[in-house]
């Protein structure tokens, strides 16, 4: 991967409110994360082996309008110590995260919503299989960890619930 | 359409062996969600002549004239890995595609990931819904709508949708078609369960419409044109964008670009 391109990415992340981005190109994958979410510290770079050989490449920087426009919505991640006491709801599959049943409808849950075991929290779609993700615990939603319509990976935390 | 008519000559082990038949219902998928595993075992069929709240992906309306088409859901309890479960849309569209060809003689194609087209017009759509608890998928509802004998379509759909009757010129026996779909579905489900995913995906690719063609991809808030290249064994559509970059997509709407 071109070092100049990596440098540009680092600057992009540093200047934005996005905490983490992942780019894959020609078999090389890098993930850039800010050391402490929400702080002004420099972004960190992780080089990784491609986990999905078929996912060959993300569009280059100019084709990322969705990512950039979502920057204002991104909320700083909760400090690690704080997340420990909360129950994590993770994605069981790779897919696209939807907070509501349709673009017109309101979200299933919001921060502050009280949920029971079995309450539908969101949909993760993979190839038109719409998976309703249910809460496996009773409690209150304290954080929605992913922006609407963004891709999620297997095991990624979607919600934090305070039991 | 009655239970007895459907069960007569149905050559399946489980698919369609338990049936809930309705004249009018809100949606067969919604009803399926309310059924427990004891009431509705694996392969249960829920079918209606009319839906008052038929839906597609993202709650889009699915409109169908009463008594003309096939509107049904199958309840599945997959006992295979979650990665294979994500391939059920391909098993579904391939089964419908094969059943249409056998029963009507019409040549049909699959559009990623689960639409079935005849003469490039959509004749079948699907909505797969599942509930996930403790990181495992318990129950899958495979909702299928096939335009069989409907002749009139709304103005805005005329060039995108059609029915088997409109394309073949003959009235189709809905029960024969349903039975064939159930048989093909059971076969494809077993293929997915017991063989490597690549087998199902290779069969699906033989019916794929999009490869090598210019397509319009609508991903959430933005759309772009690209060329469809392949489908990976995990179901992702591999595309090449106009600037030459390759990428794969997991969700979104894909249509043939008319440029």
Image (spheres, rainbow, N blue to C red):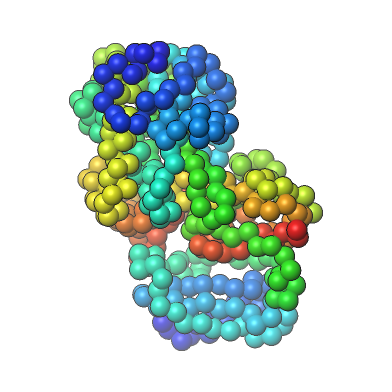
Q: Which residue is drawn at 28% across and 49% down?
A: B194
Q: Which residue is drawn at 27% across and 45% down?
A: B191
- Quarter of the image for residue A42 reads bottom right
Q: Is B225 located above or below residue B97 in the figure? A: below
Q: In which quarter of the image is the N terminus of chain A?
A: bottom left
Q: Can residue A120 be seen in this view?
A: yes
The percent coordinates of residue B120 (x first, y second) are 31, 35
In the image shown, does B39 or B199 lie closer to the viewer?
B39
Q: Is residue B55 visible?
A: no
User: In this image, A137 relative to B109: left or right?
Assistant: right
In the image shown, does A150 or B225 lie closer to the viewer?
A150
User: In this image, B89 relative to A144: left or right?
Assistant: left
Q: Is B168 located above or below residue A143 in the figure? A: above
Q: Is A116 located above or below residue A34 in the figure? A: above
In the image shown, does B217 or A129 lie closer to the viewer?
A129
The percent coordinates of residue B240 (x first, y second) are 35, 60
User: In this image, B168 relative to A63: left or right?
Assistant: left
Q: Residue at x 40, y 13 (%)?
A: B2
The percent coordinates of residue A147 (x first, y second) are 64, 59
- Quarter of the image for residue B59 reads top right
- Quarter of the image for residue A26 reads bottom left
Q: Residue at x 34, y 18 (%)?
A: B6
The percent coordinates of residue B108 (x first, y second) are 26, 33
């Amino acid at each position: 991967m071109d070092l100049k391109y990596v440098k540009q990415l680092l600057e992009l992340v540093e200047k934005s409110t996005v905490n983490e981005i992942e780019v894959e190109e020609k078999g090389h994958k890098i993930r850039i994360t800010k050391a402490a979410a929400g702080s002004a510290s420099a972004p960190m770079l992780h080089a990784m082996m491609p986990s999905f050989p078929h996912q060959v490449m993300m569009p280059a920087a100019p084709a990322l309008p969705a990512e950039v426009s979502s920057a204002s919505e991104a909320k700083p991640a909760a400090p690690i110590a704080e997340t420990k006491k909360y129950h994590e709801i993770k994605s069981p599959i790779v897919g696209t995260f939807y907070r509501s049943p349709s673009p017109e409808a309101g979200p299933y849950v919001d921060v502050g919503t009280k949920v029971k075991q079995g309450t539908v929290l969101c949909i993760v779609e993979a190839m038109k299989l719409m998976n309703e993700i249910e809460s496996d615990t009773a409690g209150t939603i304290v954080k929605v960890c992913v922006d609407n319509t963004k891709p999620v990976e297997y095991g990624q935390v979607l919600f934090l619930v305070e039991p | 359409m009655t239970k007895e008519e459907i069960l007569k000559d149905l050559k399946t082990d489980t698919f369609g062996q338990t049936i809930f038949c309705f004249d009018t219902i809100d949606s067969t998928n919604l009803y399926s969600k309310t059924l427990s595993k004891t009431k509705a075992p694996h392969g249960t069929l829920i079918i209606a002549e009319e839906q008052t709240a038929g839906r597609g992906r993202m709650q889009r309306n699915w409109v169908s004239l009463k008594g003309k088409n096939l509107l049904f859901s199958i309840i599945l309890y997959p006992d295979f890995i979650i990665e294979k479960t994500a391939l059920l849309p391909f098993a579904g569209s391939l089964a419908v595609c094969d059943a249409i060809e056998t029963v009507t003689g019409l040549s049909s194609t699959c559009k990623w990931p689960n639409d079935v087209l005849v003469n490039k017009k959509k004749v079948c759509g699907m909505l797969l819904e599942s509930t996930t608890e403790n990181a495992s998928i318990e129950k899958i509802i495979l909702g299928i709508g096939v335009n069989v004998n409907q002749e009139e379509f709304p103005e805005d759909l005329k060039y995108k949708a059609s029915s088997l009757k409109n394309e073949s010129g003959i009235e189709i026996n809905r029960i024969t078609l349903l039975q064939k779909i159930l048989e093909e579905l059971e076969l494809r489900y077993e293929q997915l369960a017991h063989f490597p995913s690549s087998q199902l995906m290779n069969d699906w690719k033989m019916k794929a419409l999009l490869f090598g063609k210019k397509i319009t991809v609508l991903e959430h808030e933005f759309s772009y044109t690209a060329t469809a290249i392949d489908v990976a064994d995990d179901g992702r559509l591999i595309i090449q964008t106009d600037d030459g970059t390759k990428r794969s997509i997991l969700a979104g709407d894909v249509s043939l670009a008319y440029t």
